[in-house]
Image (cartoon, rainbow, N blue to C red):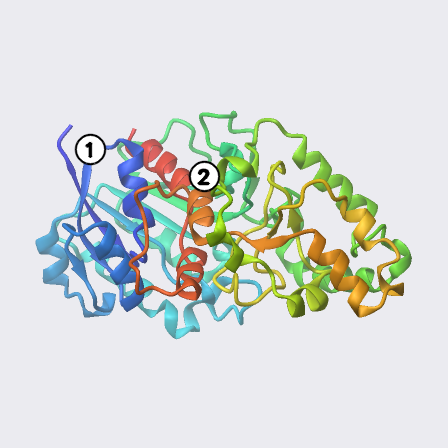
Amino acid sequence: MERLRALELYSGIGGMHQALQASGVPAEVVVAVDVNTVANEVYKHNFPTTLLWSKTIEGISLNEFDRLSCDMILMSPPCQPFTRIGRQGDTSDPRTRSFLYILDILPRLTRLPKYVLLENVKGFETSTARDELIQTLGKCGFTYQEFLLSPTCLGIPNSRLRYFLIARPQSEPFAFQALDKILTVFPSLEPVTSEISRDATGLEEGSSQVSTKGAASSSKDNRQQYRRKENFLFKLETAEELERKQERDKDVSVQMLKDFLQEDGEGLCQYFLPPKSLLRYAFLLDIVTPTCRRSTCFTKGYGHYVEGTGSVLQTAEDIQLESVFKSFEALSEEEKLMKLSALKLRYFTPREIANLHGFPPQFDFPGKVTMKQCYRLLGNSLNVHVVAKLISILVG
C-alpha cells in the first residue's frame, strides 16, 4: 500500500498525528493547520519535520487545497458551538465558520480525499453542522458511519465520550455499516446490535441513555436532589451513585489508574490541592484512588477550576472516604481541614492525563509552556487510542 498523504486540520497538539502513527496505517501528515500559537509550539516540538501552517482554515485557498492532493483529512473542529454547557450556537456561532468553509471547499476539489475522520463533542450529532456535513459527504459520493465512543471501551479508565464520523467512497462500503445509527462500540468488539438511533442521542458518561432534550432539566433535577441531604450517604453521594462507581471499579476489563500514574517523588508536591480548595470544594470533588478503574473527563479548566473539570487522586489509600465525610458539617473548620488533608488529594499531572489520552512517553511539552497551558491543551485534545482504532477501521 502506498503511503497516504494526510491533512490534519485543527491540529492542536497533534492528537490526530499521534493516532495516525499509532494506527499502523502507512501514512504521513503532509500539512497540519492551527491558529493556536501555544498548541503550535507543542506540535512543532513533537513533530519538528511536519509542515505546520499557523493560519486560519478560511485562509487556505481552493488552489492550495488542490496542490496538497491529500488522501485523508483528519479534523477536530471547534466544539464550543455544540457543548451542552455552552450556548449551542451551532452554525450561527462564528467558530463554526471554518468548518462550513471546509464543507464548501470539499466538493470543489480537483481530487477528493479517499478518507475523512472527524471528532467532536457529544451534541454534534444533533446539530445543523452535522446535517450539512452529511449532505456534503453525499454530494462527494462518500458513505459514512457515526460513533459515540469513550476510552473505557478500550479498557482505559477515563470517561471521555466523544462523537466520531468516518467516511470513504460509496464504492467501498463498511461491512458493519448501520446508516442512521450511531455505534457505541467498535464494530470489531461487538456486533452491530450495539447501536442507537440518531434521535436517541443521550448516551451519557455513565452509559445511561436519555433524550438530549431532557438533559438540561435532568441536570437541574440532580442539583435539586443534591440539596435534599436525606438522600446522601456521604459527600453528596446517593446510594445509586456510589453503587455505580463501585460497579465500575469491579470491571476488570478496564485497567487501574495506577498503570497511568507517575512514580511518587518531590515533583508531585506542587499538584496537591491547596487548603482553600479542599474546604470549598470537598463535597463536589470526584475522588479516585490508584486502584480505581474510572476517572471523569478532564476538561481544559482542570487544575485551574475545581468543580466538574476532572477527578482528583487520593494518594492516602488506607483512609476510607466515608470516615472523612460522615458528620463532616459538625466539625470546626480546622478539624475539617485536618481530615481532608489526611487524604493527600492531588491533581493528576499533565503527564498522567497525557498517558490516559494515549500519548506516548516521548511526547512532551516545551519548557516554556505553563502548567495551566498544558492542562488547557490536553483538555482540548483527544484520545489517541480511540482515534487510532477508528483510522485502522476507516482504511481497512
- Asked whether residue 185 appears in the rendered view, the answer is no
User: Viewer-proximal residue, 97 or 154?
Assistant: 154
Which quarter of the rendering shows the N terminus?
Answer: top left
Name the mark nearer the viewer: 1 or 2.
1
On the image, numbered disc 1 is attached to which residue?
Answer: 26
Image coords of residue 376 (percent x, y): 43, 62
Q: Residue at x 46, y 49 (%)?
A: 353
Q: Is residue 202 above or below residue 63?
A: above
> At numbered mark 2, what does the secondary structure look like: helix, strand or loop?
loop
Task: Classify residue 384 as left or right of residue 257.
Answer: left
Write the residue at 13% across / 31% down.
Answer: 2
- Residue type indicated by callout 1: Pro
Residue bearing the label numbered 2: 179
Residue 319: x, y in percent? 74, 44
Q: At which x and y percent is residue 160?
A: 52, 48
N-terminal of the pair, mark 1 or mark 2, is 1
Numbered circles on residues, count? 2
What number is the disc on residue 164?
none
As displayed, is residue 278 above or below residue 22?
below
Disc 1 from disc 2: Cα separation: 28 Å
With respect to residue 121, does 207 lie above or below?
above
Observer-nearest of 85 and 103: 85
Give 262 or 50, whichever is nearer the viewer: 262
Q: Is residue 367 left or right of residue 335?
A: left
In this view of the protein, which residue sits in the foreground, 286 or 395? 286
Up-down relation of residue 31 to residue 78 (above or below): above
The reply to whether residue 108 is in sight is yes
